[in-house]
Structures are given as structure tokens and as C-alpha cells.
Image (cartoon, rainbow, N blue to C red):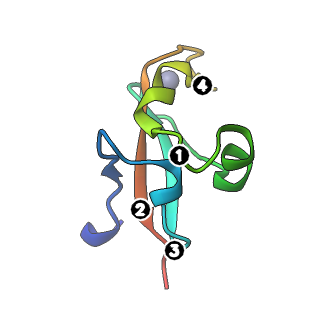
């Protein structure tokens, strides 16, 4: 993976509505499992004003099954 496409940790105040259409949202677990997040679905559920970090404790890893061990990251879509 190129350096400029390395996923970046979401900011503490970043909202769902701040994610640009050319960005991809990921949930990455402490066990290094990662999954792409469906932004549209999340937005329908939580709204664009949802602060992403507040939803992190609810994230559940599909690999290790742990809740609250994952964080949100963004990366730019490849051109
Ligand atoms: Zn995990």
C-alpha cells in the first residue's frame, strides 16, 4: 500500500457528514482485522451529525468478536 493511501485515524470531532465521497471509511480492530464501512447505511442509521468516535465502542470485530477494540480510519479512494 502506498504511503499516501495509508488509512488515517479519524479525528475526535469528525462527523459522519465530514467523510468525503472520495474517501473510504474503515473500521480497524486491535487484532488488525479491518472492514470497509458502508457510509450510506451508517448515515441512514445515525445521521450526518454523528461523531464517529462516539460510535467506536459499539464496533464489533467480525474476526475476534471483541466489541470496542476497533477504531475508525479513512483512506482516499484509488484513482
Ligand atoms: Zn479483532
First in sequence, mark 3 or 1: give its number: 3
Res. 49 mark: 1
Closer to the eye: label 3 or 2:
3
First in sequence, mark 1 or 2: give its number: 1
- Residue 2 found in image quarter: bottom left
Closer to the eye: label 4 or 3:
3
First in sequence, mark 4 or 3: give its number: 3
Residue that mark 4 sits on: 63
Secondary structure category for the residue under label 1: loop
Residue that mark 3 sits on: 22
Secondary structure category for the residue under label 3: loop
Q: Is residue 61 left or right of residue 74?
A: right
Q: CA distance from mark 4 to mark 1?
A: 29 Å
Q: Is residue 78 above or below residue 41?
A: below
Image marks 3 and 1: residues in contact by CB distance under 8 Å: no
**Residue name at image x 49 percent, y 35 percent:** 33
Residue that mark 2 sits on: 75
Beta carbon of the mark 2 residue lies under 8 A of ligand 1: no
- The 10 Å Cα crowd at callout 4, few under 14, some 14 to 19, many 20 or more, is few
**Residue name at image x 45 percent, y 28 percent:** 54
Residue farthest along the bottom direction in this orientation: 79
Q: CA distance from mark 1 to mark 2?
A: 20 Å
- The 10 Å Cα crowd at callout 2, few under 14, some 14 to 19, many 20 or more, is some
Amino acid at each position: 500500500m502506498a504511503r499516501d493511501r495509508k488509512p488515517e485515524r479519524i479525528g475526535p470531532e469528525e462527523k459522519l457528514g465530514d467523510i468525503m465521497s472520495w474517501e473510504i471509511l474503515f473500521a480497524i480492530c486491535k487484532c488488525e482485522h479491518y472492514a470497509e464501512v458502508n457510509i450510506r447505511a451508517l448515515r441512514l442509521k445515525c445521521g450526518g451529525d454523528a461523531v464517529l468516535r462516539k460510535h467506536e465502542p459499539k464496533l464489533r470485530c467480525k474476526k475476534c468478536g471483541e466489541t470496542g477494540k476497533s477504531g475508525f480510519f479513512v483512506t482516499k479512494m484509488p484513482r
